[in-house]
Every structure is written in C-alpha cells, then in structure tokens.
Amino acid sequence: MTFYQELQLNQAGSKNLLKNSETVKEKSYHILVYLVKIAVTMAFCFLFVTIFSILFGNENSIVGVVVLLCLMVFRNADLGIHTGQSTMLLALFFVIMTVCPHLANQFSPVLGMLLNIAALAVLILFGCHNPFMFNQSTLVLGYLLLYGYDVTGKSYQMRLVGMAFGAALTCFVFYRNHKNRTYKRNLKDLIQEFDITSSRTKWQICQILCVPIVLCIAELCNMPRAMWAGIAAMSAILPFMEDMHYRVRKRIVGNIAGVICFTVLYFLLPSSIYAYIGILGGIGVGFSAQYGWQAVFNTFGALAIAVETYGLQGAVSLRVIQNVFGVVFALAFCVIFYWFMSKKKESDVTVHAE
C-alpha cells in the first residue's frame, strides 16, 4: 500500500493498520501517515469553508460545510444505481436541501413538519437505499444544518448561488469517479424494491417520519436549536434495534462527557481562543473511530457556536436536553412503529389463513 493509498483509509482502517503493526518502525510509519492525514484533512476543510464564507458571506459558511460533506462522501460512495441517474438525483437532492428547509422555516411547526417529511422522503428513499453506507449522515444532516442555520433576503440569494455551485462541483466529482462502474439497477428498481415488510423500508420510514416529528415537537415547546434534536434522532435510527440501543447509550454519554470537557476548557482557556475549541473538536473526531468518542468531540463544535448566542449555561443545557430528547424519542418511536408493523403482519397472516 502506497503512502497516498494509506491516506485514503478511514479512521478504522488506519487504526487497524496500527494495531496489526509487527515492528516499532512499521507502527511509527503508520502513525506518521495517520497524523499527516488528519492535518491535511483539517487544513483542507478549514480552507474550503473559509473560501465559501468569503465568497457567499459568513451567514452561509454552513453551506461550505454541507458541500464539503457531500464532496468527501460521494467521491467514494454511490447510490447503488446507474451513474447518470445517480448524478441527476444528487442534483435534485441539492435543490431539495436549498429550497425545502427555507420554506419549512416560513411555515408553522406542523406545516413545516409535513414539508420536511416530503423532502426527507425523497432524500432517504432514493439517496439512502443502503443504510450501511450511512448516506443519511450526509444528506439528512446537510438538510438539518441548512434548516437550523436558515437565512433570508440577500443572504438567501447568496445561499442559492453557493448551493448551485456546490451541486455542480459535487455532481462533477461524483460522475468522474463513478462513470466507469457498472450497475445492474436503476431508479425504477429502487421504486420497485420499496417493501413495507422489509427491515430496510421500515428503517427508511422511521427516518422520514421521526426526524420531522422531533423537530416539530422541539419547536412547539419553543426549544432553540431544534435541529440538534433532529440530528440526534437521525443518528440513532438504525435498521436493527440492538444497534439503536447502542447508539442511544453512546450518544447520551458522549454528549454529557463532551459538555463536561467543553466546560472545563471554557474556564481554563483564555476567551480569545474560544473559537478554536470547535477546531479542537474536529481534530478529535478525526482521531475517533468509535461513535461514542465522535459524539464527545462533535459537541465541541456545536457548543463553540451556540455559546456566543445563549451563554455557557444556556448552550450546555440546550445541548444535553435536545440530544437526550432526540435519541430517546427516536428509540421510543421505532419500538412502537416496529411493534405496530409486527401486529399488522400477524393480522394479515390471520386474515389470509381464514
């Protein structure tokens, strides 16, 4: 494996190489490559988002984050169908992420929930057909970030331009990287594979319904940063209940640990470098292969932004409350949904038997 190829590995792959190193020299080499990868990734991400902020305004720095996420994921990940159709779907996803979150913010929480359900239905049914590729962590997360950091007026006009540029860039990179691959399935197959009795479709429906409902409830309760609850719910909803229980535990414990660590750093560090705590969190995520640790360090970036608006106590309280509410509600929702579907299946079997 070349130096460049090793740079392309994810955290788990790099840590597996470190774990299986047979000599000190070999382990030192893998550590060096891993550190270089983290440094290059952080520098590129910082530069990319900074350029987006300069071009489209500081209010649209989140657009840079969303576009960056899509680029980094879809340069390798696919949608499982014909490349041309996948490219068109990606363009459609960008249109949805640009328009629907903004419109939903203009409506009441209930009407906004209905629009969010419709938008997420398209993103998840056509973009997250394989749950183990975790495309929802890109598409749904991007949607929620744009929903939570909505803008109006001139800033929204610049957001339209920024998202159009991001769509063109992502589609270009995606098509270039996947054009030589052969796929046996197409868009029609995705539609035909929709099956309410399959675990995959049940998982998709839970994502489509639960995340917007969580947002709606948080907004009806006048809780700021409702997107945090939505993101927590999205990350906890998995096809298998055992995996969901694991995610819920790790999300709650990780966020509480992250809040404690952030608070300690907040009091120990001078106020002039508070903004860099978020960057420290990004580095921590880069070193983390396990979900629990990722939850810890993801908290840093969220709190670094929120503390400027709500103060330390308010930001910390919101973070814990929104995340606990999001994952607990998602777990309860899925348990009830799966129970209902199992009862419906038993009822259908009984009817057919009679």
Image (cartoon, rainbow, N blue to C red):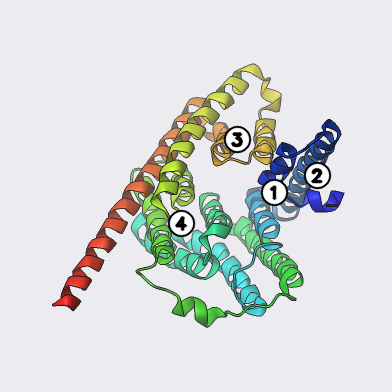
Residue ID for mark 1: 10
Give the label, 2 or 4, closer to the camera. 2
Is 258 displayed left or right of 15 in the figure? left
| Residue 334 percent location from the top left of the image | 34, 53
In percent of width and height, residue 321 lies at 41, 35
Residue type at numbered disc 2:
Val
* Mark 4 vs 1: CB contact within 8 A: no
Nearer the observer, 91 or 51: 91
What's the distance in space between the residues labelled 4 and 1, CA to CA?
Answer: 36 Å
- Amino acid type of the residue tagged 1 in the rendering: Asn
Q: Mark 4 highlights which residue?
A: 105
Residue lying farthest top? 268
Closest to the camera, between mark 1 and mark 3, is 1
Q: Is residue 141 above or below residue 122?
A: above
Disc 4 residue type? Asn
For the residue labelled by badge 2, is the local secondary structure a helix, a strand or a loop? helix
Give the crowd class for mark 2: few <14, some 14-19, many >=20 residues within 10 Å: few
Where disc 4 sits, the SS reads helix
**On the picture, is 70 further left or further right than 245?**
right
Image position of 319 (left or right of 11): left
Image quadrant occupied by the C terminus: bottom left
Asked whether disc 2 touches disc 3, contact meaning CB atoms under 8 Å apart, the reply is no
* Quarter location, residue 155: bottom right
Amino acid beneath label 3: Phe
Residue at (60, 75) in percent of width and height: 81
Distance between mark 2 and mark 3 Cα atoms: 19 Å
Residue appearing at x 47%, y 78% in the figure: 191
The numbered mark, 4 or 3, whose residue comes first in the sequence reads 4
Is residue 224 visible to us here?
no
Which disc, if any, is residue 297?
Answer: 3
Foreground tag (4 vs 1): 1
